[in-house]
Each structure stands twice: as structure tokens, then as C-alpha cells.
Image (cartoon, helix red, strand yellow):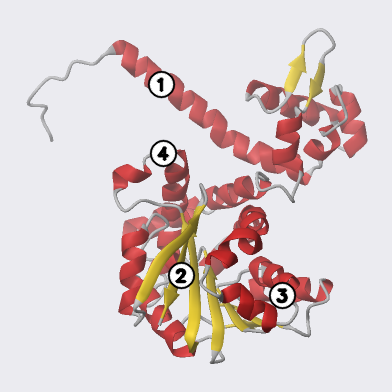
Amino acid sequence: MSTIEHAVEIDGDKLMQFVFRAVDEVGATLNTALVVMGDKLGLYRALAGAGPLAPAELAQRTGNAERYVREWLNAQAAGGYVAYDPDSGRYTLPPEQAVALTDPDSPAYLPGFFQIALGSVLDSPEIIQAAASGTGFGWHEHVHDVHEGCERFFRPGYNANLVAGWLPALDGVVAKLERGALVADVGCGYGASTILMAQAFPNSAFTGSDYHSGSIDAARHRAQEAGLAARVRFETAPAAAYSGTAYDLVTMFDCLHDMGDPVGAARHVHSTLNPDGTWMIVEPHAGDRVEDNLNPVGRAYYAFSTLLCTPASLSQDVGLALGAQAGEARIRDVVTAGGFTRFRRVAETPFNLVFEARP
């Protein structure tokens, strides 16, 4: 039995402030499922540009049950996602929310962010057990919403930045890609980054790899749909054992910190690059100190790191568990331990840091 040696005086106002903050957070947590619901049922898309709609009208347009639609709309109005007019009883999706919730070509597109969050929460009982025992939980073990949501979350950022900003920030890489380069995209998932680069540089050949066979199946299907099967190849392989050599460029997008043995992966990248080749590493935006990351983006990434990234690394050999908020200094340590002599930050966004490593 523990005893309290010193009485602590509780500030009632501060206590209630925290309680109401917690109420708001529970509402936000539940809204994650409601955003995914609105996305999957087509509710946001039907609202976009439609002007004020009554619940019955939205239900009819989307083929959903009116009673559910009405309650969903009220929850969205309470959260500020839609606007409600009490005089008419109608609801409107503001144009800014319409962009963020319905335009997959916008870098502000959010449904994938909510989808991966919902999948992470659905798998949280498994993570609780893993945390109690110190074991891991592999990426391949997560529900489909994690895999698909991850691709949908990161793809808009890649579309906005990869070809326009990140690749040009690398020393001499765009010229090589335009002439015709050999590229390995490691940890490619559904292949969004691989396909985007292949579309931009038709003289180059690309190999995407990922240890998750289900993602590779999806990537192959998407490459076929895009008419890129002749220049884009996908294989199921871990980062430390993907095939091929003499690559001009190796890329890793938001995956190095998930690996059990990132140093081993770095060594393999070093062994497969041309002497004048480049390794581009895209990682979540993070400072080197905890206090640098105590902000909304850092909060989301620490949460994903707890539920996804750290368990994934611990499920693999070595299990270094860098975490999603590893920061530049720890990434530099991994890269130099892998044999690289040059490392620099070349670009950043609110969500990502982009590094260049050279042998």
C-alpha cells in the first residue's frame, strides 16, 4: 500500500479545464471514424459544391439511410466540419473543407490520414499486449485501413513535392533521371512514389521493393493500370536484401525508421549504389530533442510511432526501434554507420525531412 507523504492542493478550475479538454479529445477520436465513414459512403463528395442540403437530400444522393446521415451531419456540424443553418435545417460543406476532404490531388487531402489513424486504433488491443510483453507487431499484421490509409496519406505530399522539389534538390540526380537512370525504391508500399517517378522520367527504369507481399500485389496492379509495366518492376524483399546493383538512385520514403535493422539496410544500399550514386531518404519531420516535437505534428507522429512504427521495428531482427520522431542526428548516425561519407538535409515540409546520402 502506498502512502501520500505530501498533500497536493488541486486547482478546481485547472481540473475542469483538463476534463473539458478530454471531452473534446474523445469527440475528436470518435470523429476519426466519422470522417472515414463520410469518405467511404461518399457523403463529403456529395456535399462538395452542392450548396445547402437537408439530411434527406444527402441520403437520397448517396443511397444511405437518412437517420444515420442526419446524426452524422450533426456530429460534423458540432466539430466544425460542415456548417449548419438552423433556419432551413440544411448543411453546407465549406469550400476549404471540400478541398481537404474530397480532392485527392490536393496536398491538403486528409481522408488517408484519418483512415490510417482509425486502423491504428482498431489494432490497439494488439499493441497493448505487445507493450506489456516487449514484443513487436509487424506491418503485415495490421488491418487493411492501415495499409491503404498510409498510401492515401503520403501520396498527396509526394505528388506535390517529389518531382517539383525533392529530386531537384539532390546533386545532379534529375539530369541522370532525364538521361536514363536505374532506380530502386525501397519500402515502396503500394508503389505511389515509384509510379510517380516513372511517369516523370520515361527514360529511367525503376524497381520497387517491400517486405509486405500484399502491398507489392497492389503496386503491380497500379503500375499495370498506369501503363508502366515495361519500366517498373516490383518485388517482395526486405530492405537489406532487395535485388540489383549499380543503381544511380535509391529512395526510401517514410520507412527507414520502421526497419528493425536500419544500419543493415544502409549497408545494403551502399553496396548496391554506383560510386557516384545517391540515396534519398524521406523521413517524418522531427527535431532531435523531445521538446522540439511537442507540437501538433509531433503529437500525431509520436502516436503513430507508438502504435505502428515502434512495434513494426521490434517485430524484426535487431529491433532498433528508431521511432517516427527519430530526428536528423539519429538518421545521420544510421547513414554513416552504413558506410556513407556525405549526408545533408536538402528539403523539408511541415510533415517531412528529406536527406541526401552519398558514398
User: Which of marks 3 and 2 precedes in the sequence?
Assistant: 3
From the viewer's side, name the closer residue of 137 and 193: 193
Between marks 3 and 1 in the image, the one whose residue lies nearer the viewer? 3
Q: Are marks 4 and 2 in contact (CB under 8 Å)?
A: no
Which secondary structure lies at badge 3? loop
Q: Amino acid at mark 1?
A: Val
Q: Mark 2: give few (<14), some (14-19) or many (20+) Cα within 10 Å.
A: many
Q: Quadrant of the N terminus?
A: top left
Left or right of 308 in this view: 213: right
Q: Which residue is mark 2?
A: 356
Q: Which residue is mark 4?
A: 295
User: Which of marks 4 and 3 precedes in the sequence?
Assistant: 3
Between marks 1 and 4 in the image, the one whose residue lies nearer the viewer? 4
Q: Amino acid at mark 2?
A: Glu
Q: Which residue is mark 3?
A: 201
Q: Position of residue 122 (x, y in %)?
A: 56, 50
